[in-house]
Amino acid sequence: MFFLENAEIIRNDRVADGIYELECSASEIAGNGDPGQFVHMEVKPYSVESVSPLLRRPFSLYGVTREQGTISILYRIRGKGTSILAQVKPGEYLSVLGPLGRGFTLPAEGSATLLVGGGMGIAPLVYLADRLVRLSCDVNVLYGAETASELVALDKLQQEGAKCHIATMDGSRGYKGLVTDLLTCISEGEPTRMSTGKQACTDIVYSCGPLEMMAHVAKFAKERGIPGEVSLESYMACGVGVCLGCALRLRNGDASYAKVCSDGPVFSMAEVEFGAGEGEVRQ
Ligand SMILES: Cc1cc2nc3c(=O)[nH]c(=O)nc-3n(C[C@H](O)[C@H](O)[C@H](O)COP(=O)(O)OP(=O)(O)OC[C@H]3O[C@@H](n4cnc5c(N)ncnc54)[C@H](O)[C@@H]3O)c2cc1C
Ligand code: FES
């Protein structure tokens, strides 16, 4: 079930160059939204003068405070819609539709979990980590970004109780290089509990970020027999399974298409066709 709410903006803060965190009141979405689900948001308050941009924009649930009835999203300015969204002020209202889509499958209490996020792909994993910690899971997060200043979710993850392992492309914090390189470190035994060699000590892997990154994570998990899920992106129009604008071909045959908005955005790693991106875990 989803809701259409006229959400009051509580804050819309610039947290890094081109990256914003927006919190708004949306009690029904907050009360019903699960990790991995998303909201479809109008990017400016209603105006009779202009309906442009016409289409809503999809954003993952980044944080949810059920008691206060608020949700937050973390977004990067990409084009017209997100540029306009960055101008929205506290006290203004935006129309928000959600919670939409299929979220992550939660494991049994006390499971060992591995979360791999790159760039804005960290957003749904932050809310997931919060829920996993409440389930007494062991939560290890591999978090990759271009540079240290873009690690905007790190404090939140650490406050939630997740163990974070960092990779930045410029080496300004943590390992210098791709976050998927950290998978190699794990398979060599550090950090502990996650995996040693080909023997899995992780019960489930979750990933969100660039497709190539998720392809590496999926290969890593498959080789060790660990189940996993990825959160995918697609261009969206309706966001509710009606227009077919977000269709994506799955692994099992040409005739098998899924709607990212309603069959996903979270899919089992085994069912996703990563295409040419699926390759070696970088050494
Ligand atoms: C389920 C889902 C969850 C998402 N969660 C987040 C999130 O938590 N944080 C966040 O920053 N972004 C998220 N996105 C992406 C976000 O929706 C787009 O960045 C946004 O719609 C861009 O709008 P725009 O008008 O600024 O850009 P546009 O003017 O529409 O496009 C600008 C550029 O961005 C590219 N682009 C636009 N939309 C997408 C897309 N869906 N996938 C790939 N490339 C795209 C275009 O090719 C173009 O190059 C999510 C997308 C989906 C489908
Ligand atoms: S966006 Fe319309 S069916 Fe998915």
Image: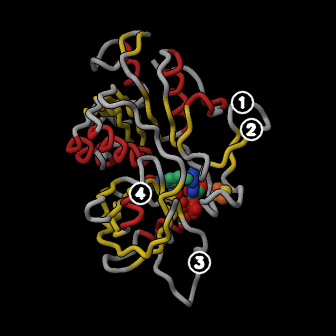
Name the side, left or right, on which 88 lies relative to 213. Answer: left
Separation of marks 3 and 1 at Cα, in angstroms: 39 Å
Q: Nearer the viewer, residue 126 or 15?
A: 126
Q: Give the crowd class for mark 2: few <14, some 14-19, many >=20 residues within 10 Å.
A: few
Q: Nearer the viewer, residue 79 or 183?
A: 183
Q: Which residue type does callout 4 highlight? A: Asn
Which residue position holds label 4?
A: 32
Q: Which residue type does callout 1 highlight? A: Asn
Question: Callout 2: helix, strand or loop?
Answer: loop
Circle number at residue 256? 2
Question: Callout 4: helix, strand or loop?
Answer: helix
Q: Position of residue 259 (x, y in %)?
A: 66, 49
Q: Which residue type does callout 3 highlight? A: Ser
Which residue position holds label 1?
A: 252
Question: Callout 3: helix, strand or loop?
Answer: loop
Name the side, left or right, on which 81 lies relative to 24. Answer: right
Question: CB atoms at circles 3 and 1 under 8 Å apart?
Answer: no
| Mark before the other along the chain sequence, 3 or 4 | 4
Q: Nearer the viewer, residue 32 or 133?
A: 32
Q: Position of residue 178 (x, y in %)?
A: 42, 31
| Mark before the other along the chain sequence, 3 or 2 | 3
Q: Of tags 1 and 4, which is closer to the observer? A: 4
Residue 27, quarter of picture: bottom left
The residue under the point 54% across, 52% down is: 101
Which residue position holds label 3?
A: 52
| Mark before the other along the chain sequence, 2 or 4 | 4
The residue under the point 55% across, 46% down is: 265
Q: Which residue type does callout 2 highlight? A: Ser
Separation of marks 1 and 4 at Cα, in angstroms: 32 Å
Q: Of tags 3 and 2, which is closer to the observer? A: 2
| Mark before the other along the chain sequence, 1 or 4 | 4
Q: Position of residue 17 (x, y in %)?
A: 35, 57
